[in-house]
Amino acid sequence: MLQSISIQNFALINQLEIDFSDGFSVITGETGSGKSILLGALSLVLGQRSEGNVLKDKEKKCVIECSFSIEKYNLQEFFESRELDYDKETLVRREILPSGKTRAFVNDTPVNLKTLKELGLRLVDIHSQNQNLVLGSFEYQVGIVDTYAKNTSVLAKYQLNFKKYQELKKELKLQEEQAAKEKADLDYFQFQLEQLVEANLIEGEQKEMEEELETLNHAEEIKSGLYQSYGLLSEGDSSVISQLKEARSSMAKIQDVFGEADAYFERLDSALIELQDLSQEIDRSNESVEFDNARIDFLNQRLDAIYSLQQKHRVDSVDELIKIREELEGKVGKIESSDERIDDLKKQLSEQQSKLKKSAENLTGSRTKAIPKIEKTITAQLVLLGIPNANFKIQISNNEDFQQLGADKLSFLFSANKNGSLEEVQRVASGGELSRLMLSIKYLISSSTALPSIVFDEIDTGVSGEIADKMGAMMNQMAENIQVISITHLPQIAGKGKYHYKVYKADDEHETYSNIVLLDKQHRLEELAKMLSGSDLTKAALENAKVLLDS
């Protein structure tokens, strides 16, 4: 419930504070007095975008603050999910800075415009003439039926299944498109993989084969060098080893007469052993080196195959080729198993479709059950509101596909004439008929669910007299369940209000400003009399006003 509104520096308002109560309140005032300004300020607090420069004093900021009692609205989860402090008495504030930027706060916590609007929809339902136009939209119509049928949990379950169904459809389509693309590349991947598999690559083999080939290509030169080295070391009396043996013998002869000879002998003996060992290794190497054309041909072919693969795949080593082979094995395996993944997704989609179909049928059943009661109630209210031949029907049928709000096609049909053909309401209803139809719908759902406060902005346009009186009575009945505020020009409706506020425009020596005041009984009587007869307060007008209040 809206408890109060405070406005500073907005349009023609310098500063304004007004309290509201539960039940039925009316707001009246002459055209141009500022009723739309008051409504505009409330709309800003509820998340509407600021349009143009609305500051009265361009050097100061505008502040609009509303207090709401939200204990009955079950909004704890909304506040918790958005990390807002929940309070039964909630303050919502909107500030417009001289720069044009705006800020919004809920219980002094900054919020973005999206959050403010989401909260605003849960606090106040502002019904203006423009809202009559949405009566023809499918979303609005199905929302009315679901609200009356109390389908919140049924619709939530359907939408959860619908979301999963859409996700599976999207994933299946993606997998099928990807599989089709990959299968087009499968032959190419398999050809590349076969080449790498046939190559039978082994880590480190390239370096070993390159070294072996280098040796084989220089076999004669290597054998010649080894043979010559061996001969110099070991063959003939003048070889290094023969001469080293003689040097060792000479040193042995003087060991007894020369003290340092022992050390020289040992060093010569060590050198001899090392050179003999080296000579044998050189001889063995010489024997192992053979010129083998077949082996050279094999190594050249093997290395050429490796070099060709490296060039093709733009890498420099066998290890990198092995890595590419493993990646190709993975790609080919994934493509070959994609059919299994697609079959699995199709199975999941079929199972989810069955669940979705069942929840859609539950939703349709609940709507179908509620529709006759809705039709009966709204038709009766339209007759009461001066459309004696009113006929209102809700047409429901199965849709071709599942949608966000179910699998139903739904249309509001209306006729104001006796035996008239039913047509979609937005095509045949006049402005006055739309106003009465919207009021009947609000009346219907206000008795079946905890709606937020409702503000009617001149919903009575196009009606008068007895019909206006009945519209006022309906609003009064609605106010037994929710807070109702009606901005009106009609005394028949204004007289029904529990509280009567007047918006007026006044001048001081500096400026023109708008204000609002709660009327006491005498001032209210005078306001109603003026609404009946004009600015002249005649005795008859006062008597008529008294009758309106007493009734």
Image: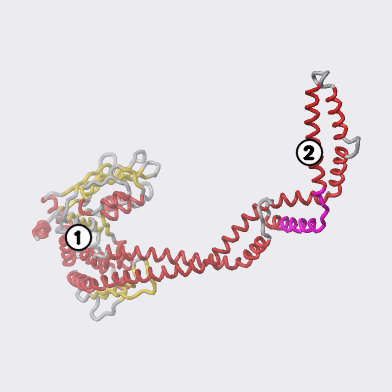
Quarter of the image for the C terminus: give it. Answer: bottom left
Whole-number angstrom distance, CA of label 2 to CA of label 1: 127 Å
Highlighted range, magenta: 287-308
Which picture quadrant has residue 358? bottom left
Label 1 secondary element: loop
**Nearest the eye: 472 or 276:** 276
Type of amino acid at the residue the image marks with label 1: Leu
**Nearest the eye: 456 or 519:** 456
**Nearest the eye: 57 or 262:** 262
- Mark sitting on residue 277: 2
Label 2 secondary element: helix
Left or right: 380 in relation to 294: left
Q: Residue at x 28, y 46 (%)?
A: 92
Residue 138's spot in the image, x, y percent? 33, 68
Examine the residues drawn in magenta and state their main secondary structure: helix
Residue 270's spot in the image, x, y percent? 78, 31
Crowdedness near tag 1: few (<14), some (14–19) or many (≥20) residues, C-alpha within 10 Å: many
